[in-house]
Amino acid sequence: MAEARKAGSLPVANVQALAEACNGEVDHQQQVPERYLSKDPSSEEVVAGDDGACAIPVIDLRKLQDPQASEEECAKLASACLNWGFFQLINHGLPEEVTGNLMDDVVEFFKQPLEDKECSQQAGSLEGYGQAFVVSDNQKLDWADMLYLLVHPTESRDLRFWPTRPASFR
C-alpha cells in the first residue's frame, strides 16, 4: 500500500468544480472537456433489461477461503477483475451496521461543497479527494471524483487526507 503514496497522480480539476462551473446550464459555449469524452456516444450500444446479464459480479469471501469452493470463486474473481474492474464482496465479516454507517459518511462527504473538502490530493500522492491514476495530460478521464485513503496497515494512514466532516468518518 505504501507504493500507492509513491505512485502519485498528475493534478487535474475536480469534476465537481467542472460541473458547478456550468451551474446546471449547458449552452454552445460550455462543453464537457475533451479529455472526458471517450467515444462517440451515438455509437455506444445501450444495454437494458432485467435478465441479470448486466448484474454486478458478486464475490463470496467465505467461499474464497474454503478449499472446496475457492477454485470456482477464484475464477469468478478473476473474471470480475478482467471484465468489469469491480465487484461486490459478500460474507466479508463486517457487520451491516458498520458498512451502513460508512456508506452514510461517504454520502455526506460527497454532498459537501468543494471548498469544504479539506483533503485534496497533493502532487506525488494518490491519497485525498479528486482524480487518481492520471499519468498523462492526454489521458482520457472518468467523469468522477474519488476519495482515496490508505487504511491498512494503520501506521500508513495519513490523516491529512481524511475528511474532518462528517466527524464520524474518522
Image: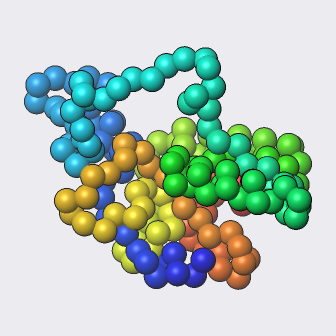
Q: Is residue 42 visible?
A: yes
The residue drawn where x is 50% and y is 78% is 5
- Judge from the rendering whether residue 63 lies leftward or rightward of residue 29; answer left or right: right
Kindly give the residue lying farthest to the left in the view shown: 29
Picture layout, residue 108 above or below residue 136:
above
Quadrant in which the C terminus is drawn: bottom right
Of residues 13 and 4, which is closer to you in this image? 4
At 89% from the left edge and 48% from the top edge, which residue is drawn? 95
Q: Give the residue displayed 10% in from the left and 30% down from the top.
A: 29
* Residue 103: image location, x then y, percent: 70, 43
Estimate the x, y position of residue 148 in percent, counting from the top left.
54, 61
Residue 132 falls left or right of residue 49: left
Q: Nearer the viewer, residue 5 or 55?
A: 55
Quarter of the image where the N terminus is located: bottom right
Q: Quadrant of residue 107?
A: top right
What residue is shown at x 48% (from left), y 57% (from top)?
129
Position of residue 146 in the picture relative to residue 26 (left or right): right
Q: How is the image coloured?
A: rainbow
In terms of depth relative to the viewer, which is nearer, 66 or 136?
66
In the rendered structure, the answer to whether residue 44 lies left or right of residue 50 reads: left
| Number of numbered callouts drawn | 0
Image coordinates for residue 6, horizontal then vertical, percent: 46, 82
Is residue 105 visible from the viewing direction of this image? Answer: no
Position of 111 relative to 41 (above/below): below
Q: Position of residue 155 (x, y in %)?
A: 70, 82
